[in-house]
Each structure stands twice: as C-alpha cells, then as structure tokens.
Image: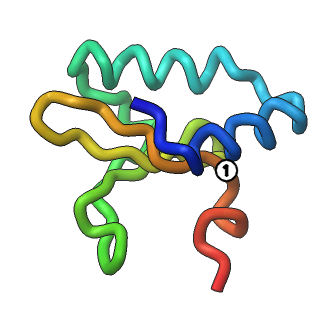
Amino acid sequence: FFVIRFKRDFKRIRKKHKNLSKLQAVIELLVDEKALDPRYKDHRLIGNWAKHRECHIEPDWLLIYRITDNNLYLERTGSHAELFRK
C-alpha cells in the first residue's frame, strides 16, 4: 500500500530523474518477502519510526517502509535531509 506522503515523495524523486527501476527492484523483493542484499543496509528505525524499516536505494536515497499483517506499506522515500530534517 502506498501512503499519501510516499506518493508525494515519489513525484519528487521522479522529477529528480532518479533511476526508478532501482526502487522497483527493492519493492519487488519486499513484496516477494525476500531478504534484501546487504548493500541496501536494511535496518529497523527507532524513536517515532520504531515500527518501520529503512533501506538505502542509493547512498542518499532511502525507502522507509513497514510490514504489518503481511501487508507492505511504503511510507517515505527521499534523501536523509528530506526525510529526517529537524
């Protein structure tokens, strides 16, 4: 499922001409319930994002997601600064 903020993030990423096939490849692995390669640095988040996971599509291009009751929720995508600015 796409969360509304993810849809906005996706539009922003598309305008930056990022290689969307990289994002698609990661999403397909997650949908198929396959483990992500270590290069994606998949890990749990803490604090307000404690029920979520993050992986790196590129060094400064992240995907934040959660899996609940066998449903994949795509929460956010973008750079560290865009997603975690204070």
* Residue placed most toward the observer, 46 or 70: 70
Q: Tell how many labels.
A: 1
**Residue 40: image x %, image y %?**
46, 38
Vertically, is 24 above or below 35?
Answer: above
Q: Which residue sits furthest left?
A: 69
* Residue placed most toward the observer, 26 or 48: 48
To which residue does mark 1 refer? 78
**Residue 56: image x %, image y %?**
53, 44
Residue 47 appears left or right of 17: left
- Location of residue 86 by image quarter: bottom right
Secondary structure of the residue carrying tag 1 is strand
In the picture, the quarter occupied by the N terminus is top left
| Amino acid beneath label 1 | Gly
Q: Which residue sits furthest front?
A: 4
* Residue placed most toward the observer, 53 or 42: 53
User: What colouring style does the render use?
Assistant: rainbow
Label 1: few (<14), some (14–19) or many (≥20) C-alpha neighbours in 10 Å: many
Residue 3 appears left or right of 6: left
- Location of residue 11 by image quarter: top right
Residue drawn at x 31%, y 18% is 31
Residue drawn at x 14%, y 29% is 70
Residue drawn at x 58%, y 50% is 5
- Location of residue 21 by image quarter: top right
**Residue 60: image x %, image y %?**
68, 52
**Residue 25: image x %, image y %?**
51, 16
Vertically, is 84 above or below 43?
Answer: below
